[in-house]
Amino acid sequence: MSLIKDLRTFILEDEFKIIYQNNKLGILNYSNITHFDNNKIMVNYKNGIIIISGSNLIVSKLLIDELLIEGSIEKIELR
């Protein structure tokens, strides 16, 4: 039974994750985007809000549970 549970957890990943690499920010399992412009993006997640500040920010990937932000990211805040 544990093997099935582990497989289900792997396939249906529901944990909130942030991955920052090469000036790109990936966000997994977010709730919604509350603010979006070239300098600031605010994203709600289960336990709070994440605020991304910078310049020339764009959302290059937008899925129901996944988000990729590119641009000159200067600050990432978790509240």
Image: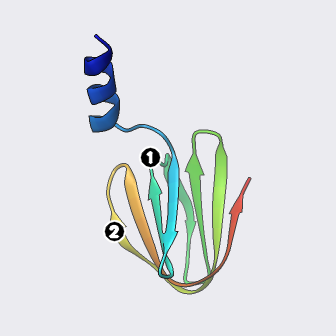
Q: Dot 1: within a 10 Å radius of its alpha carbon, few (fewer than 14), some, or many (20 or more) residues? A: some
Left or right position of 22 against 49: left
C-alpha distance separating marks 2 and 1: 13 Å
10 or 30, nearer to the observer: 10
Name the residue that disc number 2 marks.
61
42 or 23, nearer to the observer: 23
Left or right position of 2 against 49: left
Count of numbered tags: 2
Name the residue that disc number 1 marks.
29
Q: Quadrant of residue 35?
A: bottom right
Residue type beneath disc 1:
Asn
The residue sitting at the front extreme is: 3
Query: What residue is shown at x 51% (from left), y 51% (from top)?
Result: 17
Query: What residue is shown at x 53% (from left), y 58% (from top)?
Result: 18
Where residue 13 sits in the image (x, y, percent)?
37, 38
Q: Is residue 48 above or below residue 73?
A: above
Left or right position of 26 against 44: left
Residue type beneath disc 2:
Lys
Query: What residue is shown at x 55% (from left), y 78% (from top)?
Result: 37
Asked which secondary structure carries label 2, the reply is strand
Left or right position of 73 against 14: right
Asked which secondary structure carries label 1, the reply is loop
